[in-house]
Every structure is written in structure tokens, then in C-alpha cells.
Image (tube, helix red, strand yellow):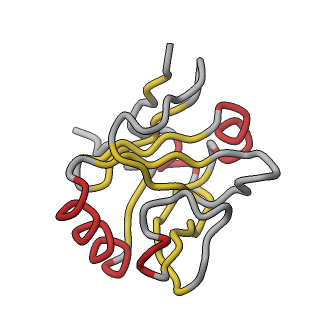
Amino acid sequence: METTISRLSATEKALDVIYQLEDKYGALMFYQAGGCCEGTQPQCFEKGGFFPRMNDAMIGTINDHEFWIDRDLFEYWKYSHFTLDVTDGFGPGGFSLETPLGKTFKVHYRLFTKEEYENLEPVKRSE
């Protein structure tokens, strides 16, 4: 039996911020766009606070919170594992829920090995 490989993980620092946000807002969601205004940093919203576009990709969950990425960005990054992290600072646009904490989420990427890529979890697409 082969192990299914996750496309997504989170650092302990990111999880600590997520726990704080859960306590304040409840269910969350993440969206990483590819546009110029919001950059390519992930944004955190209350669940339902953002609606993915048709064919955007949900690459996994963090603490049961869906992590969506822009459909075009996914095509570019589909060969990469995403690790959600957080840093001090003011994120793009200030719309993400962690902004009042003086934090901003960011993603580290690494390419999958051939073996990992052949055993990835499936991606969910918005309709």
C-alpha cells in the first residue's frame, strides 16, 4: 500500500497563529491568489469570507481549514509542496485575519520528487 503525499503542511509558528485566529473567528479558510494587488502571499479569511473562482484548486487543509490557490498559480506550482509559515510584518493589502496581530502568512515551496509527485493527494476544484 502506497502512502499518499500531502501537498500542504504548516510550521508550528503558523499553527500557533491559526489557533489564535480560530479562538477569535471560528472556522477559517486560506486563499493564495496570483494577482498583483494581493501578491502571492496566502490570505486568511473566516470560512465563507472569500469565494474561490471557477476551477481554483483546494490543495489541502490545515487544521481542517481549506487552503485554496488561484487556478493559474496552481498550474505553475503544482509540482511543489507548500509549507505555510508566518512572519512578523504587515501583509499585502491588510485583508488577512492575522494582520492585526502584526503577522503575515507566507509560503515556502519545494519541488516534489518524482516518487512523491506520482502519489499526491488529489486536488479539489471549485465549480
Residue 76, given in percent of the width and then of the height, sits at: 74, 43
- Quarter assignment of residue 90: bottom right
Q: Residue at x 31, y 54 (%)?
A: 62
From this viewpoint, which residue is outermost toward the right?
Answer: 36
Residue 127, given in percent of the width and then of the height, sits at: 50, 13
Q: Residue at x 27, y 77 (%)?
A: 16
Q: Residue at x 67, y 61 (%)?
A: 93
**Placement of the N terminus among the 4 image quadrants:** top left
In this picture, is 44 found above or below 15?
A: above
Is 94 or 9 nearer to us in this picture? Answer: 94
Residue 9 appears in view: yes
Is 57 or 81 nearer to us in this picture? Answer: 57
96 left or right of 72? left
In this picture, is 99 found above or below 6?
A: below
In this picture, is 87 found above or below 32?
A: below
Residue 59, given in percent of the width and then of the height, sits at: 46, 40
20 left or right of 91? left
Is 82 or 25 nearer to us in this picture? Answer: 25
Q: Residue at x 36, y 42 (%)?
A: 66
From this viewpoint, which residue is outermost toward the top?
Answer: 127
Residue 110, given in percent of the width and then of the height, sits at: 60, 64
